[in-house]
Amino acid sequence: MPRFTPVLHLIMPSLLLMGSTTAFAAEEVQGSDVSVVGDTRFWVGDRVAVVGKRSVDAGRLLTSVDRISGESVQSADVDYAWQLLARMPGMTLTEFNQGTTSGKVSFRGFNGEGEVNAVKLLIDGIPSNSNDGNMPYIDMILPLEIADLEVVRGTTDPRYGLHNIAGNLSFDTRSGGDYFDTKFTVGSFGKQDAQVVAGVESDSVRQNYAVGYREGDGYRDHSDYRRVSVAGKWAVDLNESMTLGASARTYSADAKEPGYLTTDIAYQSPQSTNAYNHSDEGARDINQFSLSLDASLFEASTLHLLGWLNQFEDNRYVTFSANTSQQNRYTEEEHYGALATLSFEPEVSFLNRLFIEAGASIEVQDNISKRFLTQDQLLTSQTRDQEFTLTVAGTYVQTMFEPTQWLRITPAWRVDRVGGDFKNHLSGQDAPINDYGTISQPKLAVAIMPMPELMLFSNWGRSFQIGVGSGAYLIPPRQEDVAPSINEGWELGVSYQPMASLAVRIALWDQTATGELKRKLNDPLGDFDNLGATKRDGIDLQLSWEQSDALTVWGSVAWQKAVIDTPDPQTPEFKGNDIDHIPRWIYNAGVDFDATDKLRLSALVRAQGQYQLNSANTAGRFGDFVLLNLSASYALNQNADLAFEIKNLTDENYEYVWWDGSQSLHSPSEGRSLNASLSLHF
C-alpha cells in the first residue's frame, strides 16, 4: 500500500499559510434568478445558485467558467460522460470510437489526440488524469449521479499544477439527500442501459450509491461492448463543525475494436470493419478511493483535507492499418496523493472584502507500460517494458481583496517540484527525471463591476507542461535536461446580465508556450517531439436567455487559432503552420421548451469546422460537421418519465480522422439513431 509520510512534510507547513478554494458542500437553490455580482460563470441549461460558501469558488477566480447543473444532464442519453461536454461552449470532442478508447474533450486551442493533454480532470475533487494526461476515469461516471459539471478555462486557476495547462474540468456527484432514481434505456444498434442511484440521509450520516450497466452492438461491425460501474459515497458529521467523508468507485469494460478505415471504404461503407481487425479488442478496469475531512476551525475559516488512490489497468489489442502488425498495449498505473487547503476571511475596516487562501498537494505515480507485437493476440515480440515513478508536489497562495464594491483584485502564486525515476527492463537502462527545477507560476486577475449587472474582467497567468511517459526522464542519448514548457496566457472579458433571465459573456484570450512537447503516439520508447514555441488565441461568445418559465435558449460561438510560432530547428518549414486537429470554429446551441406541464421538447445543435491532420499541413483538412439531436420527455405521473431522443437527425457523415504518415485513416461516428428511456423517481 502507498506510504503517505512525504505528504505530511508538504502539507503541514502549508496549513500555516492559510487558504483554500474548497469548502463544505454548499446549499443549492433552484430557479432562474441566480445572478451573483462578480461571478463569471456561464450556465448551460438550468441554473443553480451556490450560496453559503466562505471560500472563493471557481466562478470568482475571474476567468471564464462554464457550468451545467445535474438536472440538465441526468436525463441525457450518452455513451460516455465526456460526451456531455457537447453542451458546453467551445469544447472539442475527439471521438475515437475504438472500443474502450472512446474519446475525450479538449478546449482553448488544444486537441484531443493524446499528444498534449492540457486539461486537469477532477472527480469529486480527486485528480483523475492518467499519467499521459488522458481522461479514462470519466468513463466511470453515470449521468444520473452527476450533481454538476464545471469547466474552468485559462492559466489563472492556482489550485492545480500537473496537467492544468489550459484549465480544468470537474465532475461533482450527488452528496446527501433522500432519493431513489432509476433509468432504463434501449436504442439503436443494440443499446441497453440501466442506471440506479440512491441517497439516504439522516441527521448526521449521508450515503450515496450508483450502479450502472451498459451494453450494445455498436454502430460499426465488430464494436460490441459491455460496461459496469459501481460507486458509493459516505459522509459523517462528527460534530457541528467537522465532517468525515469517504468514497469508492469501480469500473470494468470490455469492447471490440472496429479499427480505422481508408478514405474510400469509410465513405462507401462507414459501418464496416477490416478483416485484419477481427481480433482487436480491449479490457479496462479502474478503481478510485478517497478519504476527506472538512472542518470549520474557527469563525470565517475552513479546512479541507483529501487523500486518494487511483488504480488503472488497460489491456488493448489494436491494428492501425493493413501494413502494420497488431499491437498488445498493456498499462498499469497506481496514483495516490493528498491535498490540503485552508481559508480565512478576516474583517478589515478599510476593505470591502479580504480573502486569503493557501493549499498544498502531492501526486505520486507508479506506472508500468508494456507493448508487444502480436498476431491474432499471440505474442511474437516485445517492444516496450517500462516502469517509472513520478511525484509532483505543489503549493499555492491566493488572495482576493476588494478595495471597493466595484473593484476586485485576485493575485496568486503557485510553485511545483517534480521527482521520479525510470527503468527500461528491455535494455536494463535506468534514468532520472529531468531536472525541471522549481516551476513558478504567478497569476493575477482583476475585475471592475461598475454596476451589479455588468462586469469587466481580465486575467494573466502561467501554467506548465512536462513530459509524460518516458518523455519526462533524462534517457540517453539525451545529455541535457529538458526544461518544462511554460504556458503564459491572458484573457479580457465582459459578463453582462441585465436581467435574471438573460446572460451574455464574451472573452478574448491568448496563450503561448515555450518548447511545447508533443508525445509520439506510436513510438516504442514513448518519446516526444519538440513542437517548438506555439501561439493560441481566440474569441468566445456565449448567450443564455430564459424567455419564460417554459422556454430557454442558449448558444455559443468560439473561434480559435493554434499555430507553431517558432518551430523546432529540424523543421523550420513548419513556422506559421496550424497545429493538427484543432478546428477554427466551434458552435453549439440548445432550446428547451415546456410545451405543457408534462411535456418537454429539446433540441441540441453542435457544429465545428475543419482541422489539419499533421504539423506539416500537407495531409488535407477534415473534421467539419453539423449535428442535430431532438428529444421529448413526458411525465407519466409524479414518479415516472418517458423520453425519446433522435440523435444525428440528418444522418450527418461525421468522423475522426488521423494521418499515419502516408494516408488518412478514418473512424466514422454513429449515424441517425433512436433511443427510448423510462425514468423512475422515488
Image (spheres, grey):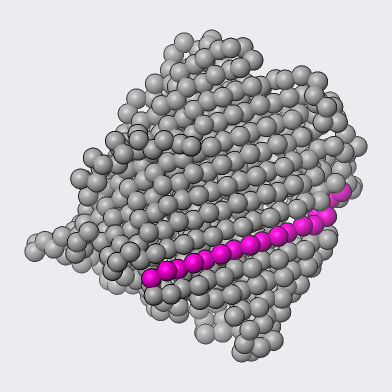
On the image, the x and y values in percent for residue 367 come to 55, 31
Residue 680 seen anywhere in this rendered image of the structure:
yes
Q: What is the magenta segment's predominant secondary structure?
A: strand
Image quarter for residue 423?
Answer: top right
Instruction: Look at the image and say whether residue 509 sits in the magenta stretch.
Output: no
First to last magenta residue range: 204-221
Is residue 325 depicted above or below 31 in this figure?
above
Farthest residue to the left: give it: 349
Q: Residue at 39% of width from left, 64% of height from top?
A: 236
Write the residue at 66% across / 78% down: 680
Q: Is residue 646 visible?
A: no
Residue 214 colored magenta? Answer: yes
Q: How many marks?
A: 0
- The correct choice, above or below, for 376 with respect to 178 in the image is above
Q: Position of residue 223 (x, y in %)?
A: 81, 48
Give residue 514's position: percent from left, percent from top: 43, 29
> Residue shown at 66%/66% (left/top)?
195
